[in-house]
Amino acid sequence: MEPPEEPLRPVIYTMENKPIVTCAGDQNLFASVYPTLSQQLPREPMEWRRSYGRAPKMIHLESNFVQFKEELLPKEGNKALLTFPFLHIYWTECCDTEVYKATLKDDITKWQNVLKAHSSVDWLIVVVESDAKKKNKTNILPRTSIVDKIRNDFCNKQSDRCVVLCDPLKDSSRTQESWNAFLTKLRTLLLMSFTKNLGKFEDDMRTLREKRTEPGWSFCEYFMVQEELAFVFEMLQQFEDALVQYDELDALFSQYVVNFGAGDGANWLTFFCQSVKSWNGLILRKPIDMEKRELIQSQEATLLDLRSYLFSRQCTLLIFLQRPWEVSQRALELLHNCVQELKLLEVSVPPGALDCWVFLSCLEVLQRIEGCCDRAQIDSNISHTVGLWSYATEKLKSLGYLCGLVSENGPNSEDLNRTVDLLAGLGAERPETAKTAQSPYKKLKEALSSVEAFEKHYLDLSHATIEMYTSIGRIRSAKLVGKDLAEFYMRKKSPQKAEVYLQNALKNYVAEGWALPITHTRKQLAECQKHLGQIENYLQTSSLLASDTHLTEDERKHFCQEILNFANEQKESPGLKVVLSMHSFAQLKHLHFDPSNALVHVGGTLSIEITLLSQMPISVQVEQIAVSVHFSIEKNSYRKTAEWLTKHKTSNGIISFPNENSSVPFSRSSSPALELYEMYERSPSDNSLNTTGIICKNVHMLLRRQESSSSLEIPSGVTLEDGAHILKCSNVTLDPGVNKIIFRTQAKEPGTYTLRQMCTSVGQVQFVLPHIYPIVQYDVYSQDPQLKVEPLTDSLLAGIPQKVKFTVTTGYYTIKNGDSLQLSNADAMLILFHAENRAIIYSNTREKSSEASLMIQSSEKVTSVSLPMAPAYHMIEFELEVLSLPSTPTSGESDKLVNKEPQRKNKEKQKAGNCMVTLDQKVSIDCPWSIYSTIIALTFNIPFKATHSLLSAGKRKYIQVCVQNLSELGFQLSDSNLIDTGNSPDLQLVPLNTKCQKFVQYSAGEQSQAGGSKGIGG
Amino acid sequence: MAVCIAVIAKENYPLYIRSIPAEQELKFHYTVHTSLDVVDEKVSAMGKALVDQRELYLGLLYPTEDYKVSLLSRLGIPCVKSMFPNQLHRYGYVTNSKVKFVMVVDSSNTALRDNEIRSMFRKLHNSYTDVMCNPFYNPGDRIHSRAFDNMVTSMMVQVC
């Protein structure tokens, strides 16, 4: 680069700008050192200390060296910084004192005066010394060299303003040293000048900014001033600082707009309120958009112009700073912001104009970023750009709707006029993008040109956006864009394409429980399915909508009517049955068994009352409600007995079903609660506890795959079980809200019946509840007739009449008139009966049903008890008195109750101590229901124990008889006497006891009955 | 002030959501729902490292042309909020129990500063804590509390 000879042209705003340094003096000399100088100057960085506490920076300096001219010096008030000469250098290689005195001194003085006149203090005099020249001039005074003279004459106290450069063109260490010293000096002085001049400029700028409340203040003027500073920073490669200047301008402007909105309007701002006439989007391909800058300079820019220019500069700087992602983020903010500012300032904008502007701008930003990043970088930063993609999609969509490009019939003439107007506002394509095939301008123009082109561009954008959202995991956003797309397809009458997007979005909303979006999406889906003719799906969706409380009453009725219409239409042509899930139609709330223990004997009647909560907004006539029942033969026969029944009386027979379709399907309340049970395992041998634990009984419900829950939307999984056992209820009207339906069934086969499915038929539509959970079962049992005989007291005592209770459990047997029990009389047991023996008949549930008198006939061998008539599964209870007779009738009346210990027959039953001896009496009973006799063993206890001993005193003998009562009853002993059975004449027995009654009681312990006997003769 | 306030459960279903004006309810539901994407992103991006930090505020989630949405979190996400004079912004807040608070603010309401948003969230969080302390409230159920309602109402009307 040659030092420019011609007068300086106006500043060209390119990146080639460098700070200006003027050169005066020996131009040839400068020309000779210039190459080295321009090469060496930027080589080493210099620390730049800044004012206002800004952090110091290392900076590589470059300069634009121009020939000194007085015109270059700025006049008072000129704020231009780019053309500002930061340093003035005077070059000389004079070494002759005479020459110095004659010409050089004057020349320098003149130069200095010019500088002083412009109050410029940034100067430097360079004296180039060369050995070659020194040798020629011998009359040099070594002490007072030219340098000293110059310092003396000009550098008043600033001796550093004069430097010596030794042999600049030689390659010696001295030259090198001298260069280094010179360059350091030059850099220092340049930085000093920057600090001083920029500082002054900033101060002036601040002063100007402080005046902003004054009436004549103009933002555009101020803009130009601060931008000048930004340019200088950019020139010094201080992009960060340059960006700060633009950000400050941005913030200042925003603040004004906000204040304007608050009613505090600045005059200059009204100019920005002019209506928008051009909307050609951001231009980011040039470092500086001169066109727009000139508009600002001439104060003709609109708000969009200003914002566009400002952003283009910020974008340029951010890209220099390698922060392309910030560009995308700021772009989105800017676009939102501009839309808002225009609204705030009440700028009139033709419809669609802003959409065009935003669309073009989004694509421009994206293309600019793509232009400076490689594919991998872009792919890993989708989260920064996807917002712009989505915004562009949104805007293109609204343009399409505006211009009639989405309607079925294509645009009408009004739409076309609007399109023409919009295209006019775009103007001609700018030359920078004219050659780009995919420029935003071309895209928009093409998209608006025809329905087909619009569709292509819109689909491209939408798919790209969805793909990007999906790839970064923003599923919800992706679904929302998909929903827009579905809307588009619906308008284009392609419901088959719309369906998948709606389904996907709906699935997401259902999974996360967002009621309003669910309702809205479902409504769209219903329309879509209707168009597609998916009758089953449509009806299912309709039923969901009809039960949706977020819809208005009318809408709900409409969807309910849709179902009913279909149901009635198809009545004439049977064949097609539509099976739908019931949960949206009606909910099973409670189930009530009667009898409450859900146990019924064969032939008995069971009634089941079902509480159904109808979700439909209107009353629905239902032809049939059927519950299919699964039958299994229960192995555990115990459950089927009446005994079990009486023990499990506590249950009230009501089973409640959890709310299956709460408004929050995802919440814990809808998933079944844990059903935990304690578990004990005992050792079979000694019944000690081996293990305990907790068992979850409904693991299969809790651990099922999440996806299966989506089957609520796809009712195809609902199938009707074809069970042989079905409970039915016909012609029911289901009113909105709670309905009670009663099913009655006659129990037939014994076993366990499980309620599996419920099906409600409305015309050809069937609503099916595929599983009834928790499990509902009832049992049917069959029981054999039984006879039970048990004493009323704990034990029976022999010898006294006692009551025995007879219990006949009829089971399946019905006792007819004339049925009787035939008791074969045992030898030693009498059955005593009275005329008014009564029997009580109980029902199955231990309720007394009737009473009847009992006919008892007795013959020698058989006692016949004729039973009262009783239906099956009843119980007859009556009592009879029995008396166990002595087993040895020969041994006289008196000893029949006394155990004669030595001759005791059933010795094996006798236990040590004072335990009672027992006596078993077996009775064989013939029952009417069986050909076999029932043997009943009754055990009688012998209440007394008698001991006797023979005692002697002299000639007299005494017999002591001890009778001991072992039972709990008290007995009275009277008329006790001993009888001699041998009838020997010489034996006389004299009772010693007083003739009184003795009370013999078990609790009194041993009461001895002493019988004295007269001594046996001899 | 706020135009929509939502409390979102850990499983991402709404525990409470209210908005004004009522006609735009559906739109707000969609808006809040999609903003959960950003919540997830922020929480998973920063959650692990900064769990101990007491900052719950997620800052500005993302602005749209009309709204700003914001969110509160207790996973220690430093405030990354910035104010744009857009019409509506969303802000977010996530509690330790991963309950999220989302607030949508009319972005033309530029007077609203970051600190005010924070204090609104704090109020919301306190009120939510009160709801949780109610022995009759089952965690995970929708919030039906008059006190909470009133507090939300006060935040919605305040400046409008």
Image (spheres, helix red, strand yellow):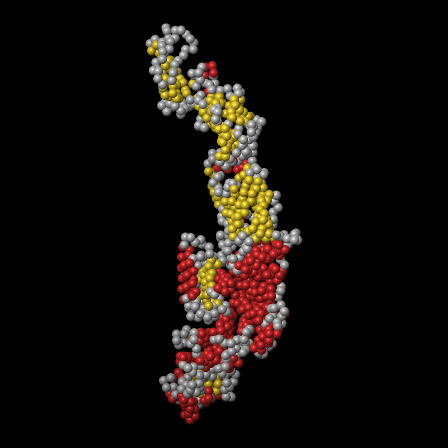
Above/below status of A635 relative to A959? below
Residue A220 location (% of width, % of height): 46, 80
Which quadrant: the C terminus of chain A?
Answer: top left
Residue at 59 percent across and 57 percent down: it is A562
Q: Nearer the viewer, residue B106 or A127?
A: B106
- Find residue B80 and report its image quarter: bottom left
The answer to whether one can see residue B9 in this image is: yes
The answer to whether one can see residue B84 in this image is: no
Q: Nearer the viewer, residue A228 or B118?
A: B118
- Count how many numbered circles sit on residues in the image: 0
**In-image side of A958 versus A30 (left or right):** left
Above/below status of A762 relative to A245? above
List the single residue furthest toward the bottom.
A102
Residue at 54 percent across and 41 percent down: it is A606
Residue at 56 percent across and 43 percent down: it is A744
Residue A653 location (% of width, % of height): 50, 43
Residue A99 location (% of width, % of height): 43, 92
- Find residue B76 and report its image quarter: bottom left
Residue A168 location (% of width, % of height): 47, 83
